Image: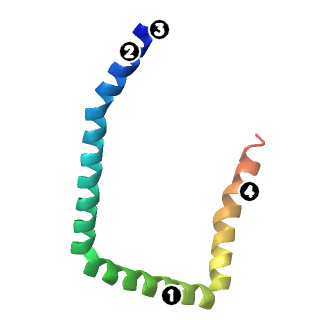
Amino acid sequence: MAQIRARREAAAEAARPILATQIAACAWAVGLLVASLGAALTWLQFTRGWVVSVVSSAATLLVAHGLLIAFAAAIVLLLPTAAYFVLGKE
């Protein structure tokens, strides 16, 4: 029993420096993340505005040309399927 207790205590003692290193690394990573986000905040706001404008433009295009897009998608999906079944019979 004393040997098991000694091993358990030794394992706990060995894990303490690892835990301290992990805490320090996590704090450093959070600090780096906060600094990076602070530096990139204006860029992120610009990118958000650009993404919103692109999505709204795409939605407008989809509504305006929905039938054409549906027809093109049907051709792209149906022709290879038909060719597979026709050529696969040989």
Spatial CA distance of label 1 from label 2 is: 64 Å
CB-based contact (under 8 Å), mark 1 and mark 2: no
Residue assigned mark 1? 56
Q: Hey, what amino acid is under mark 2? A: Arg
Which callout, 4 or 1, points at the residue further toward the start of the chain? 1
Residue 18 placement: quadrant:
top left
Residue type pointed to by label 1 = Ser
Residue at point 60%, 91% (across, down): 64
Label 4 sits on residue: 82
**Left or right of 75, for residue 18:** left
**Where residue 71 appears, x then y in whole percent?**
68, 76
Mark sitting on residue 23? none
**Mark carried by residue 1:** 3
Residue depth check, mark 4 versus mark 2: number of the one nearer the observer: 2
Marked residue nearer the N-terminal end (1 or 2): 2
**Quarter assignment of residue 62:** bottom right
Q: Is mark 4 on a helix, strand or loop?
A: helix
Q: Mark 2 points at which residue?
A: 7
Q: Where is residue 30 in the image (x, y as percent from the top left)?
A: 29, 58
